[in-house]
Image (cartoon, helix red, strand yellow):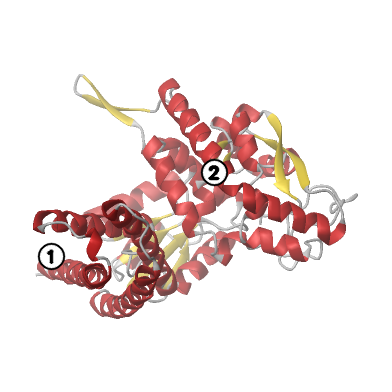
Amino acid sequence: MLKTFIKIRKSVMLTIKALIVSAITLVFIETWVNYYTNSLFDQNGNYLVVFSFVFLLILFGSLFSAFKIGIYRLSEIIYSFSLSVFVTNFMMYMELSLIAREMLDPIYLIISTFIQASVGFVGAVCANTIYFKLYPPKELLAIFGDDQAGFRLITRMNQIHHRFKIMRGVNINTEDVEKIKMLIDKYEGVLICDIDKTVANKLYSYCYAHQKRIYMMPSVTDILISKSHQIQIGDTVVIMGKNLGLSPEQRFFKRTLDILVSGIMLVFASPFMLITALAIKLYDGGSILYKQERLTLNGKHFYVYKFRSMIENAEGKSGAVLASKSDSRITPVGKFIRATRLDELPQLINVLKGDMSLVGPRPERPEIAEQYYENLPEFAYRLKTKAGLTGYAQLYGKYNTTPADKLKMDLIYIESYSIWLDIKLLILTFKILFMKESTEGIDQNKKTAEK
C-alpha cells in the first residue's frame, strides 16, 4: 500500500511539472504563430520547432534545478523557472530568425517571456503547495558525537521545517548504542552526523534492516571512496580507488575547453571590462587591477588578477583577512562589481595563461590555507586539480561556507570530474550571478571562514 501511494505521489508531481511545461509551451506557440509567421514551416517542420522549444525548456529547467520542487526554496524554484524561460526563448529567437533568414522583432518574444515567467510562478507556487500536502515533513532522530557540530546541523535542518522535523537529538558519547536503536524505532528516519565509524556502521546496519531512511554527513573518506571502482578477485569483491586526479585525456579536453571558452568570453566581456576599469579609475584614481598570490595545482603559487573592489592597500599591516559583511574597505564601485561578479573577469587572463581552469576549486591564499591545514590537513586535497574561475563549492555553497564543507564539495567535483560536468557547472554559473547568498561575506568577528 505504501509503495503504491509513493508511486501515485510521484505521478502527481510529474503530471504537474508536465502541465507547467505544456502551459509555457502553449504561450510560445501562440506568440510564434501570431507574430512570427515568416518563420513557419509546413506541418512536420513546425512540430520540430515545438519539439526544440520543449527540449530546451526541459534541458535548461533541469540544469537550473527548476523542477526540484520541494527540495529547493520556492523563491529559487521561481527564479530558476524564469531563467530557464529566458534562456530558452533567447535560443528560440535565434532559431526563428535563422528560419526566417532575418533578425526578427524580439518585442513579442520578450512579452511572451514575462507571460511564461508568470505561468512558471503560478505553477511553482501550486506545485510547491501540493508537494508538501503529499510529502509531509519527516520526523527524524539526530545522532551526533560533537554537541556543537550536532546542534549546528540540527539548526540548519530545522530551517527547512517543511521537509524535516528533528524530534530529538542524542550524543553518541553519552547514550548506549542499544538504547539509541530503540529510539530509532520511534521515528521515520535518522540524521547521522560525523561520528565514529564503528558505531556508525552498527547504526547503518540497524536502519537498513528496519527500513529506516538515513541522512548522513559524509566524511572526507566517504567522498574519496564514493567513486571507487568495484573489481572481482576470484570470489572476493574489492573496491579500488585510483587517487590519480585527472587522466591525461581529461586534462587535454579540459585545457582545450578553457582556451576556447575563455577566449570567446574575453571578446564578449571586453566592453564591460573597459567600463569597469574606467569606473574604478574615475572613483579614486587608484590602480585598476589587483593581484594577489594564490595556490593552484600541486600547491603551485601564482598571481590571480581581479578588478580592485577595495580601497588601496586595504589589508595594510593586518595581513590576509577575508571580506566581511558590510566591510568598510569595499568601495561603492567595488560593491557593485562584486555583486555582479565583474571583479572576477580579469581571471579569464589567468585561465588563458594556464594558471587556472574555468572550473575547479577556488584558489586560496597561501597564508589562509596554512591556517586551515592546522585543523584540516585534508584541505590540501583540493590542489589535485587546477584552481577554477567557478567551482562546485561556489555553485552549491556560499562565500562564507566553512572550509570543511568547501573541501567536501570540491572533492565531490574532483572525484566526479567529466567534461560534461564542467559544461554543466559553467551553465549553472549564470544562475548564481545575482544570488546574494553566494557573494555574502563572513561575520565581522572572524578573520577567516574557518568557524
Q: Which residue in the rendered view is the most extreme toward the right?
A: 317
Tell me the element at label 2.
Answer: helix
Residue 17 image point, x, y percent: 23, 68
Q: Which secondary structure, mark 1?
A: helix
- Dot 2: few (<14), some (14–19), or many (≥20) neighbours within 10 Å? few
- The x and y percentages for residue 44 are 10, 54
Tell whether 172 sits left or right of 233.
Answer: right
Three-letter residue code for mark 1: Lys
Q: Is residue 57 left or right of residue 247?
A: left
State the mark number for residue 210.
none
Residue 235 coordinates in the image, percent (x, y): 19, 23
In terms of depth relative to the viewer, which is nearer, 307 or 304?
307
Q: Nearer the observer, disc 1 or disc 2?
A: 2
Q: Is residue 286 visible?
A: yes
- Label 1: few (<14), some or many (≥20) within 10 Å? few
The answer for how far apart the CA atoms under marks 1 and 2 are is: 49 Å
Please tell me the numbered disc located at residue 3.
1
Q: Residue 289: where, in percent of width, then height?
A: 76, 46
N-term mark: 1 or 2: 1
Q: Quadrant of residue 93?
A: bottom left
Q: Which residue is mark 2?
A: 265
- Along the horizontal axis of the image, is 72 left or right of 144? left
Quarter placement of the C terminus:
bottom right
Which amino acid type is shown beneath numbered disc 2? Met
Above or below residue 405? Residue 348 is: above
Compared to 250, does 413 lie above or below? below
Task: Please state which of residues 130 and 422 is positioned toward the viewer in this rendering.
Answer: 422
Image quarter where the N terminus lies is bottom left
Q: Could you say which quadrant of the image residue 5 lies in?
A: bottom left
